Amino acid sequence: MNRKFDIDLSGKVVTITGAGGVICGGIAEELACSGAKIALLDLNLEAGDKIAGKIVALGGTAKAYKCNVLEKESIIACHEEILKDFGKTDILINGAGGNNPKATTDNEFCSYEDMDIKDFFALDESGVKFVFDLNFLGTFLPTQVFAKDMIGRKGCSILNISSMNAFTPLTKIPAYSAAKAGISNFTMWLAVHFAKVGIRVNAIAPGFFVTNQNRELLFDKSGNPTPRTNKILNATPMGRFGEVSEIMGATKLLISEDEASFITGVVLAIDGGFNAYSGV
Ligand code: NAD
């Protein structure tokens, strides 16, 4: 990891949802190196444990908790355990999220031809609800549980994870796009709501990073780039995917009470220029 820009998180408790995943696992490792005690929440305990083990092996402080961000009872149970293990959470990173094939159309554009494919009309309501809930409620509920402890305490903040599709929706994934647009909007809502009680709320909007939730959309079974990958790279002026290490500077900046003390309600793109490019 590139540690040229560092912040001091000694004594801080950072709770991260989706922390067993590629992006948030990387964030967990990075923030542990800055001195934070890391609570890793994930539906997949084994994945969280793996990252926690790596952090502890390097001399850091971390523990994984099994948590379903869609079930308030599960979040409350983790909250109680974290209070006992580490104390009150200073920084919450809402990272659990992703798309699902059940909420993905086969076609980019509706056509006049009759096609026997999963088009917009065939999308399963339960799949759409699942993806919308995972990304929106999965941020809303942990914020309800953990932000209460932050009120009136110095240096507390929340970081949400939005996406490129919040600015302009991507084809095929209407629920994920709408939910991430909801996250950007909710980030601003929370920033205003908590402004007078000392909690800053911001979001990062990663461009394209190869992780578990999008690998199948980006590469075929033989590992060759799909046509969608070629489109993405052509639409990214820097012409490549992002590296997880490239998310760390923005993350550390936005959660830093010293460097970002007057920054709240922003959604910061980390995208190699994707959002700025019209394609022409
Ligand atoms: P990932 O699949 O590697 O990680 C997601 C993690 O969330 C997994 O460990 C998974 O077990 C966990 N999770 C799923 N459902 C959960 C639930 N109900 N409760 C608790 N944990 C749950 O994906 P990633 O790409 O690292 O995604 C991290 C975040 O970044 C997501 O919010 C994603 O939408 C967002 N994002 C990713 C990209 C990208 O290019 N990969 C781009 C923009 C935004």
Image (cartoon, rainbow, N blue to C red):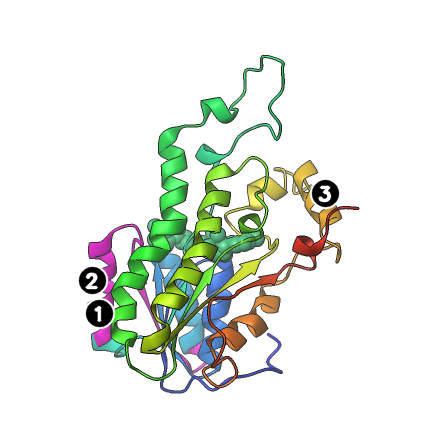
Query: In this orientation, does residue 90 appear?
Result: no
Q: For mark 2, what is the residue? A: 77
- Does ligand 1 reach within 8 Å of label 2's beta carbon? no
Q: For mark 1, what is the residue? A: 81
Say which element carries label 2: helix
The extreme top residue here reads 114
Front one among 3 and 165: 165
Q: Are marks 1 and 2 in contact (CB under 8 Å)?
A: yes
Amino acid marked by disc 1: Glu
- Residue at (53% x, 77% y) in the render: 253
Q: Of the two numbered discs 3 and 2 on the same chain, state the one appearing first in sequence.
A: 2
Is 22 positioned to the left or the right of 40 in the image? right
Whole-number angstrom distance, CA of label 3 to CA of label 2: 44 Å
Amino acid marked by disc 3: Asn
Q: Position of residue 237 (x, y in %)?
A: 75, 55
Q: Of the two numbered discs 1 and 3 on the same chain, state the one appearing first in sequence.
A: 1
Q: Is residue 249 magenta?
A: no
Say which element carries label 3: helix
- Residue at (20% x, 76% y) in the render: 84
- Write down the region rendered in magenta: 57-83
Q: Where the N terminus falls, by quadrant?
A: bottom right
